[in-house]
Each structure stands twice: as structure tokens, then as C-alpha cells.
């Protein structure tokens, strides 16, 4: 119940590193998230999120991306490490630019109770250029 949950603090710094001068774009993002909750059956959460990625875009607007969206749970001392490979294409719906992507995900590491094996990812991103 929401009435039983009280969030005391949240800290979420983030950083993005971009090396756009290199032919294939290399980027990454790091978030450190700490959420402390007070509830009868809930404990505090302390996670770090890492998202390094490598993307290459062709002249005809196809993008090939490989990334991970890894999370480390400092309380349980466990990693969740999905590896994603996505191919996307920039197109338009009428005048609206849209990126459509399809990819696969493999769980390289996860807790016993977490996801395992292979998965599929479908991505739709609406773009709003100025």
C-alpha cells in the first residue's frame, strides 16, 4: 500500500562520456542510485547502473548498437548484466521522424531469481528536431 511507503532519500548522479570524434560513436552513462525506504516489509535499495554502448550509424540512417544496461545491487552483492545488440532505422511517419529498432538481449549474469537466457527488444523512438 502506498500509505505504508515513505521515501526518505534518493541520490542519483549521472555522467555521460562521448567520444564523437571517433568514426563509430563510443558513449557510456553511469548512474549511482540510492533509495532508502521505510515500510513494514521493504528494505533500503542501493544500486549502481552502468550503460556503456557502442553505436555506428551509416549514411543511409541505419544504426548498429551494442550495449549493456548493467546494475549492481550493493546490498545483495549481485550483478544483473544484459547484453543488447540492436539494429535501428531512421524513417518518417508522415512528417514525424521516428527511429525503429529490433534487437536481441542475452543475460550474461543475473541473480538466481532474475532473468536468464535470450530475449527480444523492439524500440520506437519519436524524434522532435528543432
Image (cartoon, rainbow, N blue to C red):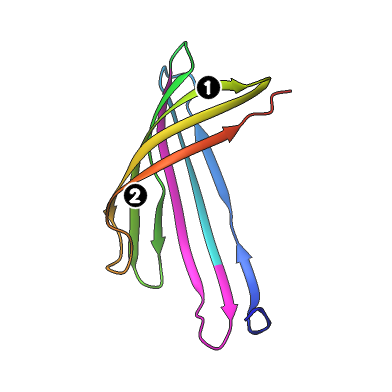
Question: Height in image: 101 above or below 107?
Answer: above
Contact flag, marks 1 and 2 (Cβ < 8 Å):
no
Residue 70 image position (x, y, % from top left): 39, 52
**Callout 2 secondary element:** strand
Can you tell which quarter of the image residue 36 is in? bottom right
Task: Specify start and end residues of the magenta stretch as a single range.
Answer: 35-57
Q: Are there few (<14), some (14-19), or many (20+) residues within 10 Å of tag 1?
A: some
Taking the magenta stretch, the answer to whether it contains residue 9 is no
Task: Name the spot of residue 37 as percent of width and height, x first.
Answer: 58, 77
Residue 128 locus on image (x, y percent): 69, 28
Q: Residue at x 38, y 39 (%)?
A: 67
Under circle 1, the secondary element is strand
| 4 is higher (above) or lower (below) than 120 | below
- For marks 1 and 2, the one nearer the N-term is 2
Residue with the mark numbered 2: 82
Q: Which residue bears the numbered disc 1?
A: 90
User: Is 72 left, or right, of 34 in this rendering?
Assistant: left
User: Where is residue 17 drawn, in percent x and y?
Assistant: 50, 35
Gap between marks 1 and 2 measured at Cα: 25 Å
* Residues packed near mark 2 inside 10 Å, few (<14), some (14 to 19) or many (20 plus): many
Which marked residue is nearer to the observer: mark 1 or mark 2? 1
Amino acid at each position: 500500500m502506498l500509505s505504508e511507503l515513505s521515501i526518505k532519500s534518493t541520490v542519483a548522479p549521472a555522467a555521460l562520456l562521448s567520444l564523437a570524434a571517433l568514426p563509430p560513436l563510443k558513449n557510456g552513462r553511469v548512474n549511482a542510485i540510492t533509495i532508502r525506504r521505510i515500510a513494514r516489509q521493504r528494505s533500503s535499495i542501493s544500486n549502481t547502473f552502468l550503460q556503456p554502448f557502442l553505436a555506428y550509424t551509416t549514411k543511409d540512417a541505419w544504426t548498429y548498437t551494442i550495449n549493456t544496461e548493467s546494475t549492481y545491487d550493493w546490498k545483495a552483492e549481485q550483478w544483473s548484466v544484459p547484453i543488447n545488440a540492436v539494429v535501428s532505422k531512421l524513417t518518417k511517419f508522415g512528417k514525424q521522424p521516428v527511429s525503429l529498432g529490433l534487437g536481441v538481449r542475452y543475460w550474461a549474469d543475473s541473480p538466481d531469481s532474475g532473468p536468464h537466457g535470450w530475449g527480444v527488444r523492439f524500440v520506437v523512438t519519436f524524434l522532435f528536431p528543432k
